[in-house]
Image (cartoon, rainbow, N blue to C red):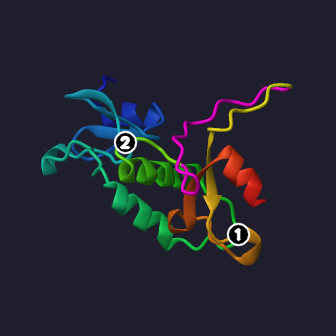
Amino acid sequence: MGPEDPIADVVAGGIFIAGGSYALGTLIYDHVNGPSLSSAASSPDKGSQGTKKTLTLEERAAKLDKKPRDGQDFTPTGKKVVKEQNSEKNGGKMKCANCEIEVKNGKKHERGVKPSSDEAHVDHKKRKREGGSGTPNNGQVLCRGCNLDKH
């Protein structure tokens, strides 16, 4: 059985897709073009190359805001969107929404080492315990100092 044989594809653990491609997780293998990473299988007869549409920052935020997350933490993607929105609003630099100092992404905390006061924290505008949502529309970037003062 050669790589072009659909039975070999099934035996290899992939799902055969008409047109000579099969998908395994997010890895797409096309016998003509070779492997590529994608979340959708390509179909040579439709001309698709398995590419995903890249969402704009506003589209990503709107998509995340649709899912109710009342009283919950931000998702990692939600935090990233809040930070990107802040950076875009401030000419490419993240700034604290309260004191407006420039903030930077935090590093992994180490025992016995006090984190920098200019470390960026993604904060709920309306507190979680008051039903504040863990979505980007309820998020703001604060410096570590302002965030700790708030709580």
Residue at the top extreme? Answer: 2
Q: Which residue in the structure is indicated by mark 2?
A: 92
Disc 1 crowd, CA 10 A, few/some/many (<14, 14-19, 20+): some
Q: Position of residue 38 (x, y in %)?
A: 35, 40
Distance, label 2 to label 1, CA atoms, is: 27 Å
Q: Which residue in the structure is indicated by mark 1?
A: 127
Residue 114 is left or right of residue 34, and the answer is right
Q: Secondary structure at mark 2?
A: loop
Residue 41 is left or right of residue 148, and the answer is left
Q: Quadrant of residue 108?
A: top right
Q: Residue at x 70, y 76 (%)?
A: 131
Region of the chain picked out in magenta, as a range: 96-111
Badge 2 amino acid:
Gly
Quick check: 149 above or below 27? below
Q: Residue at x 58, y 49 (%)?
A: 76
Q: Is residue 150 magenta?
A: no
* Labels 2 and 1: the sequence-earlier one: 2
Q: Residue at x 63, y 38 (%)?
A: 119
Disc 2 crowd, CA 10 A, few/some/many (<14, 14-19, 20+): few
Q: Nearer the viewer, mark 2 or mark 1?
A: 2
Q: Quadrant of residue 98?
A: bottom right
Residue at the right extreme? Answer: 112
Badge 1 amino acid:
Arg
Q: Is residue 100 magenta?
A: yes
Task: Report the quarter where the C terminus lies.
Answer: bottom right
Quick check: 44 above or below 97? above
